[in-house]
Amino acid sequence: MRQFSITDIHGHLKTFEALLQRLDFSVHDQLFLLGDFIDRGPDSKGVIDYVEELRATGHQVHCLRGNHEQMALDAVYGNDSWRMWLNNGGKEACSSFGTHGEWFVPEPYRQWMDELPYHLSTQGYLFVHAGLDTRVDDPLADTHSLIWSRWWYEPQDKEWLDGRILVHGHTPVSRAEIEQSILDLESVPVINIDNGCFAPASRGMHHLCALELKTHALTFQENIG
């Protein structure tokens, strides 16, 4: 069984489909998706539908909550203003849900996002959307850090990870930075696989990245929509 991780799809369904096709992803494999399925790109609804289609056909797909799912939920449930979400890609998400100009998330998709966990693990790996704060008593209970942290790594985090590799996204980095993190795993057991699918190509981004856990092989798919 091969195991893959992908993050920050941001509504780019065609790109996501193309990446899985390149991986020859099958029901014998396992996929960890690290949040931010929605916003910015043209088809947030399609991304969620495709994930559920994969699951319905026997594919092993495990999903995490990202800060964009949280922004949508906060807006819907009145915990934050709609403006923050809409100004960060929420308009594109609402358009894909077909709500005809109304800022609205249909109940099935709202429930889907609300049930997403904040962290996942498999043998030798821990997955979060953004990062963690090992200064607190229980870093995995600090949900704000798990979905919002940036540039969070400190030397003591290696001891807390206790031999595990942490894989995350949230902060877009260049392909060169992702490749370097693979080389640096012995000293810094953290891999950020967010290659900024929505970001400009001139910054070494504009791709979805898949990490194969056993071999640490990286596969990059250019944004095609």
Image (cartoon, grey):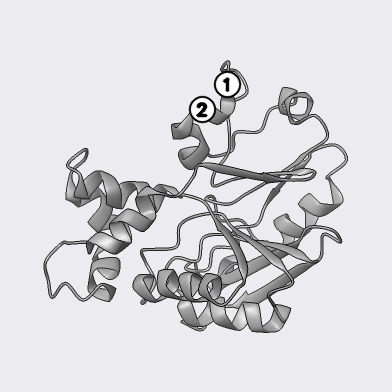
Residue 69, position in %: x, y?
37, 52
Of the pair 15 and 187, the residue shown nearer to us: 15
How far is disc 1 from disc 2 in space, using C-alphas? 5 Å
Pointer 1 local density, CA inside 10 Å: few below 14, some 14–19, many at least 20:
few
Where's the N terminus, which quadrant?
bottom right
Pointer 2 local density, CA inside 10 Å: few below 14, some 14–19, many at least 20:
some
Q: Mark 2 highlights which residue? A: 141
Residue at screen point 65% across, 57% down: 193
Instruction: Say above or below: 160 vs 106.
Output: above
Residue 103, position in %: x, y?
15, 62
Q: What residue type is labelled 1?
A: Asp
**Label pair 1/2, CB-CB below 8 angstroms:** yes
- Mark 1 secondary-structure assignment: loop
Of the pair 99 and 89, the residue shown nearer to us: 99
Instruction: Say above or below: 14 vs 190.
Output: below
Displayed quadrant of residue 36:
bottom left
On screen, residue 151 versus residue 23, left or right, reads: left
Q: Which amino acid does label 2 sit on?
A: Ala
Q: Mark 1 highlights which residue? A: 138
Residue at screen point 49% across, 27% down: 142
Observer able to see residue 223: no
Of the pair 123 and 126, the residue shown nearer to us: 123
